[in-house]
Image: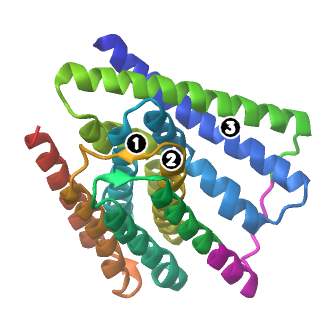
């Protein structure tokens, strides 16, 4: 058991390092090819921050543990909206941009509702996956159109120039770490779940979701301390949309998902969590410290319910 726990930690570390290397290498290559910064941010960086969820969900589905795949996304989104936004708001009140309140959060709420409706029969088939991917295409098209309408804020970044070979090597190493780390993580988590008599769905909602959401947690708290809360919450909510529409859409299209360990309550908590963030955002476009504390308390109550229901 101890060895499996060590493998889980090593797997998480490999996934996080792999996502970082992949994102950095791909961004460097894109800049060398003169791809606009806004395109890099909306595609490569967005995909990079959600790469842990993507690879863990794909590997889980392909290895025959669909509950862990769905639990990973549902748990990550709940953790993003309640624990991460809550902790960041407790560090410093989070100012929410109007575009996030009007576009990103409604899309996140809509994506959550769509997932709940498609999963009513406890199954996500290939057509369901295609519907989710179509929703993601709509989201990306709308986002790119909005970005082109207004001038994006020019932010000069001093990035060290790397040779294309070094950047390409970083992409390859990042992908390899993601694949190996995801396999190690999923196998070890499944073994621990079986040994403790815990369902793979609960493991996905807690351990797996927590592991894959570490980048967002660290980034959001640091950003809040630096007064960059608008960027932090936009990234978190955008990640929620990406997780449902792109990750579950792609996963279900490749390997249909039979859902057994994820309940309607888990889905409802995911929806309520992002709806609460949306509600709090309308008050002066700010999530205050006390509102952040409510979100954190809500997440802890949900965790208590999960553990007590074992």
Q: Is residue 196 left or right of residue 230?
A: left
Residue that label 3 marks:
21
Mark 1–mark 2 distance (CA, rounded to whole Å): 8 Å
Q: Are the residues flagged by discs 1 and 2 in contact, CB closer than 8 Å?
A: yes
Which residue is at a point 35% across and 11% down the rendered structure image? Answer: 3
Query: Is 189 placed above or below 28 here?
Result: above
On the image, the x and y values in percent for residue 199 come to 22, 34
Q: Secondary structure at mark 2?
A: helix
Query: Is 23 placed above or below 185 here?
Result: below
Foreground disc of the pair 2, 3: 2
Q: Secondary structure at mark 1?
A: helix
Query: What residue span does the magenta drawing correspond to?
Result: 141-158
Residue that label 1 marks:
69
Which residue is at a point 40% across and 51% down the rendered structure image? Answer: 73
On the image, the x and y values in percent for residue 191 come to 31, 20
Foreground disc of the pair 3, 1: 1
On the image, the x and y values in percent for residue 167 come to 82, 38
Q: Is disc 1 surrounded by few (<14), some (14 to 19) or many (20+) residues within 10 Å? A: many
Toward the viewer: 174 or 267? 267
Which quadrant would the C terminus be assigned to in this image? top left
On the image, the x and y values in percent for residue 127 come to 49, 59
154 in the magenta segment: yes
Which quadrant would the N terminus be assigned to in this image? top left
Residue that label 2 marks:
251
Task: Count the marks.
Answer: 3
């Amino acid at each position: 058991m101890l060895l499996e726990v060590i493998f889980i930690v090593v797997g998480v570390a490999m996934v996080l390092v792999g996502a970082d290397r992949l994102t950095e290498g791909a961004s460097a290559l894109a800049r060398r090819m003169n791809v606009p910064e806004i395109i890099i941010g909306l595609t490569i960086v967005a995909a990079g921050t959600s790469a842990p969820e993507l690879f863990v969900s794909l590997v889980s589905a392909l290895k025959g543990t669909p509950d862990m795949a769905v639990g990973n996304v549902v748990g990550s989104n709940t953790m993003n909206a309640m624990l991460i936004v809550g902790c960041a708001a407790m560090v410093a009140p989070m100012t929410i941009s109007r575009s996030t309140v009007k576009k990103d959060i409604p899309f996140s709420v809509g994506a959550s509702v769509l997932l709940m409706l498609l999963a009513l029969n406890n199954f996500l088939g290939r057509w369901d996956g295609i519907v989710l991917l179509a929703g993601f295409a709509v989201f990306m098209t709308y986002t790119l159109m909005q970005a082109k309408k207004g001038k994006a804020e020019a932010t000069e970044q001093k990035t060290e120039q790397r040779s294309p070979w070094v950047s390409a090597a970083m992409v390859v190493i990042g992908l390899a770490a993601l694949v190996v780390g995801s396999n190690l993580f999923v196998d070890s988590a499944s073994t621990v779940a079986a040994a403790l008599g815990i369902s793979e769905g609960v493991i996905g909602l807690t351990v797996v979701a927590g592991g894959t959401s570490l980048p967002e947690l660290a980034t959001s708290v640091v950003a809040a301390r630096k007064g960059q809360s608008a960027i932090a919450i936009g990234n978190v909510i955008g990640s929620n949309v990406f997780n449902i529409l792109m990750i579950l859409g792609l996963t279900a299209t490749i390997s249909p998902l039979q859902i057994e360990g994820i309940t309607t309550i888990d889905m409802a908590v995911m929806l309520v969590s992002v709806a609460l963030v949306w509600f709090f955002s309308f008050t002066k476009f700010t999530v205050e410290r006390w509102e952040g504390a409510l979100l954190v308390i809500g997440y802890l109550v949900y965790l208590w319910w999960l553990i007590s229901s074992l």
